Image (tube, rainbow, N blue to C red):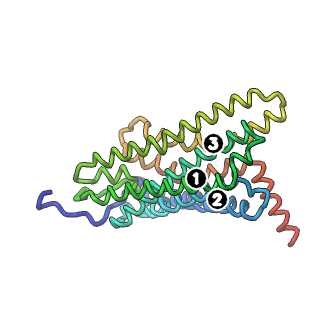
C-alpha cells in the first residue's frame, strides 16, 4: 500500500440521480410500502400465534419466512429511505459491515426456508397420510433452526473475510452495503472472498433451487394422478402460493444478476435493488394472505371475535 493512501473509516452511500421532487415523492411512496410490509408480516405473525388452527408446521414455516422478510427489510430499507432525502449519505465502516452481515444472513436464511417449505408441501401432497409423522414438530423446529444457524454462520464468515481487507478508496457505494459492492472497494486481492461467495451461492442458492425443482416435479406428477376434481383443486391450491413466492424471489434474483447492462449500470442496479428490497417482501405475504384459505379464515375469525366483543 502506498504512503499516499488513507484508510477508509466510512463509506458514502449514493442515492438515485433524480430530481428533488421525484425523490420526495418516492420517499413517501416507499415509506408507505415499508409500513405496509411490516404491518402485513406482523398480521401473519399475530394470526399464527392467536389462532390454534394455524398451529401447524406450514404456518410455523410461514411465520419464520415473515420474520426473515421483516428483518431483511429493516436492515436495508431505512437507509435507502434516508438516501432519497439527500444526495449522498455517509455510513461508518462498522455500520456498513453490520449491514453486509445482516443482508447475507437474512437472504440466505430465506433461501433455505423456501427450500424447507417446498419439502413440506411435497410431503403434504405426495404423502398426506404420513405427513404428521414425516414433518413432525421436532423435524420442523430442527429445519427452521438449521436454516437460521446456517444463514448466520455464512454471514459471519463473509463479514470476517471482509474485515481482513484494507479499504483505501474510492469509498462510494451504490445504495446500500451489499457484499459485492463492498468487495469492489477493497484495495487488495479478494480472490478468497469471491471463492467463498461462489461456494455459498452453490450451497445456499443452487441447492435449494434444485430441491424446489425436484419437489415440484414430484408434486406435479402426483397432482396429475389425482382423479377427483375436488382433490385436484385442493392439491393445486395447497402449493400454488408457495410456488408464486419462489418464482418471485428467485426470478428477481436472476434478473438482478443476469439483466442486460444499460448505459447506466449503477442506476440500473439501484432500481433493481429497490424492487428486491421493497416489493419482494411485501408481495410475498400478500400472495400468501390472498391465496391461503387457512390464513384468510383465521383473519375472519379474529376480526369476528373482536367485533363480537365490541
Q: Are marks 2 and 3 in contact (CB under 8 Å)?
A: no
Query: Of helix, strand and loop, which one carries label 2?
Result: helix
Q: CA distance from mark 2 to mark 3?
A: 20 Å
Disc 1 element? helix
Q: Is residue 51 left or right of residue 187?
A: right
Q: Residue at x 36, y 47 (%)?
A: 196
The span from disc 1 to disc 2 (Cα, nearest Å) is 9 Å
Residue at numbered disc 1: 281
Q: Are discs 1 and 2 less than 8 Å apart at CB?
A: yes
Residue 262 at x, y = what percent? 39, 38
* Relative to 219, residue 268 above or below: below
Q: Position of residue 250 (x, y in %)?
A: 53, 41
Distance from Cα at disc 1 to Cα at disc 3: 18 Å
* Residue occupied by mark 3: 118
Q: Earlier in the sequence, mark 1 or mark 3?
A: 3
Quadrant occupied by the C terminus: bottom right
Does 115 sit above or below residue 138? Answer: above
Quadrant for the N terminus, please.
Answer: bottom left
State whether residue 303 is above or below residue 121: below
What residue sits 50% from the left and 55% below the top? 106
Amino acid at each position: 500500500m502506498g504512503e499516499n493512501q488513507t484508510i477508509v473509516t466510512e463509506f458514502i452511500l449514493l442515492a438515485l440521480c433524480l430530481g428533488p421532487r421525484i425523490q420526495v415523492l418516492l420517499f413517501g411512496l416507499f415509506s408507505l410500502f415499508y409500513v405496509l410490509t411490516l404491518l402485513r408480516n406482523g398480521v401473519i405473525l399475530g394470526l399464527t400465534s392467536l389462532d390454534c388452527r394455524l398451529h401447524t408446521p406450514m404456518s410455523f414455516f410461514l411465520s419464520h419466512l415473515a420474520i426473515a422478510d421483516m428483518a431483511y427489510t429493516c436492515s436495508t430499507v431505512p437507509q435507502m429511505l434516508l438516501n432519497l432525502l439527500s444526495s449522498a449519505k455517509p455510513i461508518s465502516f462498522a455500520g456498513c459491515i453490520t449491514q453486509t452481515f445482516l443482508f447475507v444472513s437474512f437472504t440466505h436464511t430465506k433461501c433455505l426456508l423456501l427450500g424447507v417449505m417446498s419439502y413440506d408441501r411435497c410431503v403434504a401432497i405426495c404423502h398426506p397420510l404420513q405427513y404428521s409423522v414425516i414433518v413432525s414438530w421436532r423435524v420442523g423446529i430442527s429445519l427452521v433452526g438449521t436454516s437460521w444457524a446456517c444463514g448466520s454462520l455464512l454471514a459471519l464468515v463473509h463479514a470476517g473475510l471482509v474485515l481482513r481487507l484494507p479499504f483505501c478508496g474510492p469509498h462510494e457505494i451504490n445504495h446500500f452495503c451489499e457484499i459485492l459492492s463492498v468487495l469492489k472497494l477493497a484495495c487488495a486481492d479478494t480472490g478468497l472472498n469471491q471463492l467463498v461467495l461462489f461456494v455459498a451461492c452453490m450451497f445456499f442458492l443452487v441447492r435449494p433451487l434444485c430441491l424446489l425443482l425436484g419437489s415440484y416435479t414430484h408434486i406435479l406428477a402426483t397432482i396429475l394422478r389425482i382423479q377427483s376434481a375436488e382433490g385436484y383443486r385442493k392439491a393445486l391450491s395447497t402449493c400454488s402460493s408457495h410456488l408464486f413466492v419462489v418464482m418471485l424471489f428467485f426470478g428477481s434474483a436472476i434478473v438482478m444478476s443476469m439483466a442486460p447492462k444499460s448505459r447506466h449500470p449503477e442506476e440500473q442496479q439501484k432500481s433493481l435493488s429497490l424492487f428486491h428490497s421493497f416489493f419482494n417482501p411485501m408481495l410475498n405475504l400478500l400472495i400468501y394472505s390472498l391465496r391461503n384459505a387457512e390464513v384468510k379464515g383465521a383473519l375472519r375469525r379474529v376480526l369476528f371475535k373482536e367485533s363480537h366483543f365490541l
